[in-house]
Amino acid sequence: MSTVRPYTGTIQRLRAVGLRPTRQRLALGRLLFDGGDRHVTAEKLHGEAVEAGVRVSLATVYNALHQFTEAGLLREVVVDPGKSYFDTNTNDHHHFFHEDSGVLDDIPGDAVAMAKMPETPEGSAISRVDVVIRLKST
Amino acid sequence: MSTVRPYTGTIQRLRAVGLRPTRQRLALGRLLFDGGDRHVTAEKLHGEAVEAGVRVSLATVYNALHQFTEAGLLREVVVDPGKSYFDTNTNDHHHFFHEDSGVLDDIPGDAVAMAKMPETPEGSAISRVDVVIRLKST
DNA sequence: ATAGCTGCAAATGCTTTGCAAGGCC
DNA sequence: GGCCTTGCAAAGCATTTGCAGCTAT
């Protein structure tokens, strides 16, 4: 029976995908994965890191986000031209996007269902289906 | 009974939405609306205009695309971080996005149907529902 | 020791803006 | 003529890259 030590989760998670657990990646990983489902932009995450006293450059945040995404730890969500969002929930699910505030929220996977899907074009395979429900404040 | 004169459609379309039919807007409007449903980026449209011998700057293409969008003549589609696509089909419909080539295609409105929709959060109204089926080449 | 990371600053790509000159009504 | 448009070039963002120095293993 294995004892779970504090802060061990992120280290193992990184090792498991072949990424060295450096100080920066650890700090970013904890900010991302220790707090439930999160949706962040590079800038926002960088701000949080700095605020938490972690010395890390914006370039490194971008690198980490992409490495995490490539490793399957994060998912990139496209809702805004010219800004990238990353989602710590990598399960099948969709999004609410609040156009006024720029806030992105998960829609539980089973709250949206497709009744009908088109035929996939010749020579192509579906990589993903994204549903974004755009919201305006009332 | 009204006789349809060549090139009259775009002029009227622009006037109808309160935009002066300048040489540039006319040329861009024709490129966009004379050829069925189209999906363009600013850069691509600018290239087509230049190729067609129309002297127009990229900045003006951006302005025109946004003015057309605001006027309801176009619809902006978000599929790629850092690149804006505009769709001449403003009806309710969804998209195939070929990730490898960057090509965007319409899915006829009735080929996709939602079986279930989540509750809209308090204080918000649905502005639009976007479904993007991302494709990879096989 | 060494392969992999990081930081910085410069470069890039897309888009927007400011302002003088030009064109539509 | 007056006001809206345009063009150009410069500015603005978000993101990426190159490379010297640092660090985890």
Image (cartoon, coloured by chain):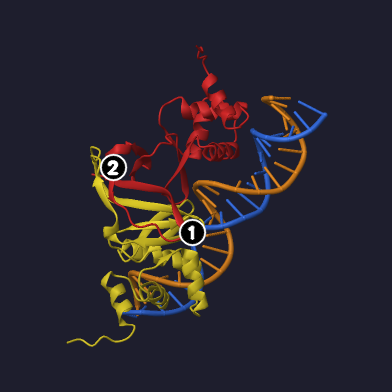
Chain colours: A yellow, B red, C orange, D blue
Instruction: Decide: few, some or many residues near mark 1? Use Cα within 10 Å; few <14, some 14-19, many ≥20.
Output: few
As helix, strand or loop, the secondary structure at mark 1 comes to loop
Q: Nearer the viewer, residue A97 or B105?
A: A97
The image quarter in which residue B135 lies: top left
Q: Which residue is mark 2?
A: B112
Label placed on residue B8: none
- In the rendered image, which residue does mark 1 sit on? A102
Q: In the displayed image of the protein, which residue is found farthest to the left?
A: A1
Q: Position of residue D16 (x, y in %)?
A: 45, 56
Instruction: Name which residue lies at 26% across and 85% down.
Output: A4
For the point 51% across and 56% down, the residue is: A100
Q: Please tell me how crowded label 2 is: few (under 14), some (14-19), or many (20+) other residues with Cα within 10 Å.
A: some
In the shown orientation, is residue A59 left or right of residue B112? right
- Left or right: B84 as drawn, with respect to B25: left
Give, as a three-letter code, the residue at label 2: Val
Q: Is residue B55 visible?
A: no
Classify A73 as above or below B94.
Answer: below
Query: What chain is tagged by disc 2?
Result: B
Q: Which x, y percent locates residue A40? A: 43, 65
- Residue flagged by tag 1: what amino acid is it? Gly
Q: Nearer the viewer, mark 1 or mark 2?
A: 2
Which chain does the residue under circle 1 lie in? A
Q: Could you give the CA–CA distance between mark 1 and mark 2, rounded to whole angstroms?
A: 27 Å
Q: Residue B23 in the image: x percent, y percent?
A: 61, 26
* A135 vs A86, nearest the viewer: A135
In terms of secondary structure, where does tag 2 sit? loop
User: Residue A22 in the image: x percent, y percent?
Assistant: 38, 76
Residue for point 50% across, 14% down: B4
Dots 1, 2 in contact, CB < 8 A? no
